[in-house]
Amino acid sequence: MNGVFFRGQVFAVFCVLFSSVGLAEDTQDLKIYTSSGAYKISQTKAFFEPFEKTTGTKIEVVSDANGLDLLKTWVSQSSSEGDVINLTSYEAEQACDKGLLVSFQEQDIAPGADGSPIMKDFLGNSLMDCAVPNVAWSALMVVKHTKFEKQKPRSWADFFNAKKFSGQRSLKKSARFTLEMALLADGVAPSQIYDELSTVKGQKRAFGKLDIIKDLIVWWETGQQAIDNLALEDVSMGTSTNGRLFNTIIADGLDVTLVWQGQIYDYDYWGIPLKTAHRDQAMAFVKFATAPEQLAAQSSWMPYGPMRASALKFVKEHEIGKMHMAPYLTTTKAHFRKALKFEERWWRSKAGQEVEKRFEEWVNGSISWPEE
């Protein structure tokens, strides 16, 4: 096996709706580290509680988002405090490279529900030797219905077409995702985005595209600001994450269209710390939690797309809102066709750091380009 705008948001409305959900008591046979809030609650309903009921294994859940740091600490000790850990794709890549996780064999992973091989069932060539992907989220374009009664923007090219589509644009004040969007709008294929951004010519191309709408941009820096900007009278379209948009749609009736063409996605993984004392139980949990039916169960609680193609047919209506979930999932076939995988590894490289500095210069005035 080989594999390789934002971490998924956790929203207050879910915490209110799910406040009655309880976690396991302190007595446990398995200790799992994951994120907090609604994300953890959806995992509790889809994975933790069913696994406890099926196997009799007691689970303790710890909320800690510093997955890579935890793994580095545990590998330097004689044993690991955690047995299973939820990781971002970048953390999983780094952990595999550094030998911090247990390796998986094909028999350690549940087969595809339709009989397809696991390498084909997991989307985007995402399966790693030592980490198994579970859900994906994305940053994408959102359009206000009230601003476009006839023809609506349908692509990043439309987002940057200020002559045809009027109004201010709400954008995250960050080079990450923003420059990818600009190049997608300028016709660069998803597979070529980071190669293009690695060259001065490509960077000039991206910033040149941003120049077209610079005077129309209303910046946001937090997920809530992204939603608040959409309420501004002069804002006609913007960017946000599919999770936060779904939350606002069901909780507040936000009247918008999500444009999936050119979405920029990322995903999470399950990994097993190298020095866990409960390897067999941890393996059993990961196999259970990444089976197609269980991945679909989490997507029925919140709009994170399952990372297995054969899981999509099992996704139900939202467990509380009773809305069909498919229109909000990152990984449906229609949504995933023209998607771009976000590469945090590239942004942490020397080239990525230089581009972030140039973005700050661009926001504050003009860019100082190197001599050619």
Image: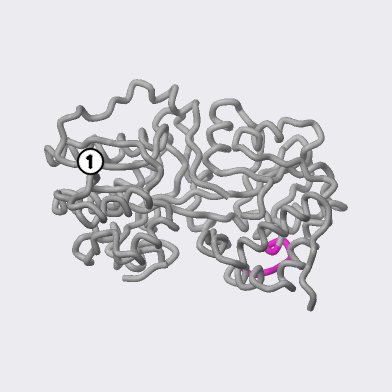
Residue 260, image x and y in percent? 60, 52
Closest to the observer: 151 or 268? 268
Residue found at the far left of this picture: 56
Instruction: Answer yes or no: is residue 158 visible.
Output: yes
Residue depicted at 19% across the width and 29% down the height: 26
Residue depicted at 14% across the width and 39% down the height: 29
Q: In the figure, is residue 17 to the left or right of 286?
A: right
Instruction: Tell me if residue 65 comes above or below residue 253 in the rendering.
Output: below
Q: Which residues are magenta?
A: 183-189
Q: Kindly identify the amino acid type of the residue bearing the numbered disc 1.
A: Lys
Instruction: Answer yes or no: is residue 313 visible.
Output: no
Mark 1 — residue? 31
Closest to the observer: 53 or 313? 53
Instruction: Answer with the quarter of the image where residue 224 lies.
Output: top right
Residue 159, image x and y in percent? 75, 52
What is the quadrant of the C terminus in the image?
Answer: bottom right
Residue depicted at 55% across the width and 26% down the height: 251
The 10 Å Cα crowd at callout 1, few under 14, some 14 to 19, many 20 or more, is many
Instruction: Answer with the quarter of the image where residue 48 lies.
Output: top left
Closest to the observer: 336 or 204? 204
Residue found at the far right of this picture: 163
Residue depicted at 66% across the width and 57% down the height: 356
**184 is within the stretch colored magenta:** yes
**27 is within the stretch colored magenta:** no
Element type at mark 1: strand
